[in-house]
Image (cartoon, rainbow, N blue to C red):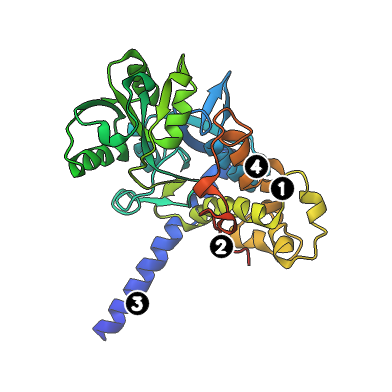
Amino acid sequence: MNPLKTFTTVTILLLTASGAAHAGTTLDAIKKNGFIKCGVSDGLPGFSFAEKGNYNGIDVDVCRAVAAAVFGDPTKIKFTPLTAKERLTALQSGEIDVLSRNTTWTSSRDSAQGLNFTGVTYYDGQGFLVNKKLGIKSAKQLDGATVCVQAGTTTELNLSDYFRTNKMKLTPITYDKSDESAKSLEAGRCDVLTSDQSQLYAQRIKLAKPDEYIVLPEVISKEPLGPVVRHGDDDWFDIVKWTLFVMVNAEELGVNSKNVEEMKKSTNPDVKRLLGVEGDKGKDFGLANDWMAVVIKQVGNYGEIFERNVGQGSPLKIQRGLNALWNQGGLQYAPPVR
């Protein structure tokens, strides 16, 4: 017996069996259930926020887009509101199929914690929210401050690193929910609230007197926020990842929810492939051939979901900034449909 040959044969069999065990199992379960289980935040305007039982936000729209891709219907979703502490465990345990909840892509989450980030929905960075009456204009003036921070987030480590690097002292007060930390700031139990800047703007509009608070200019971290799935199922990973890429590509190509049918007449090969007029991009993903067109028509391109949820069409009125397309000075860039 040739030991090398035996080893090689056994290894191939094991790898094949492992792949077969994982491939497509999430999608199969989703189709059997008839809906996608999507984890969202426990209440963050612009990202995932429930009003009278209806969820809205950029993270919510990502889940709706995935449902449109799989079922041709963006309503085939069960939303599960999760705190920062609960979110990763809920995904790891199978309680949810995808987490779309302002979650930062980090090395440990992408490896040791058994998760796969599928892209970046929103490029963010950590900042500070303070009451104007304190007269603070810069984070460098926060030495000795009491700081409200949400537990179970990358924010805690960033906060500690920033104060240590700048030789400043702080007293952190942690809360499980973002609303709790904001209420604590409003009540004067802490001098400053720290979180991703997008979250600070969202929390500020919920305060009784939002105009009395300012976001300081410093951005102390990189916070790429995006959807997350479990390791071990590349088919599902590809669907969630490419749903986001489809929306980014659609904006770049000038395809939106209102003109998608007309754009099917385009002579641009990139547009034709995107909308399923040319090629068979549905087969690649185990979906309908026009699934990308359905996503755009029912949910919109990236620019549309940004503007209505966090941009100029929303109460937050956040500038595109880093989240503009790559050819408009931003970082949003998607691989081609080809």
Task: Tell me which numbered mark, 2 or 1, is placed earlier along the sequence.
Answer: 1
| Type of amino acid under label 4 | Glu
User: Which numbered disc, 3 or 2, marks the residue that appears first in the sequence?
Assistant: 3
From the image, state whether disc 2 or disc 4 is nearer to you.
4
Q: Mark yes or no: residue 39 visible.
A: yes
First-in-chain label (1 vs 3): 3
Distance of label 2 from label 4 (alpha carbons): 19 Å
Above or below — where is 35 with respect to 245? above
Q: Which residue is mark 3?
A: 9
Cα distance in 3D space between marks 1 and 4: 8 Å
Residue type marked 3: Thr
Q: CA distance from mark 4 to mark 3?
A: 51 Å
Q: Amino acid at mark 2?
A: Pro
Residue 220 lies in quadrant: top left
Instruction: Mark 1 and mark 4 in contact? Answer it, CB < 8 Å.
Output: yes
Considering only vertical position in the picture, is 199 above or below 324?
Answer: above
Residue 70 appears in the picture as rendered: no
Give the amino acid at mark 1. Asn
Q: Closer to the camera: disc 4 or disc 3?
A: 4
Q: CA distance from mark 1 to mark 3?
A: 50 Å
Camera-side mark, 3 or 2? 2
Q: Position of residue 216 (x, y in %)?
A: 38, 33
| Residue that numbered label 1 is attached to | 256
Tag 4 residue = 304
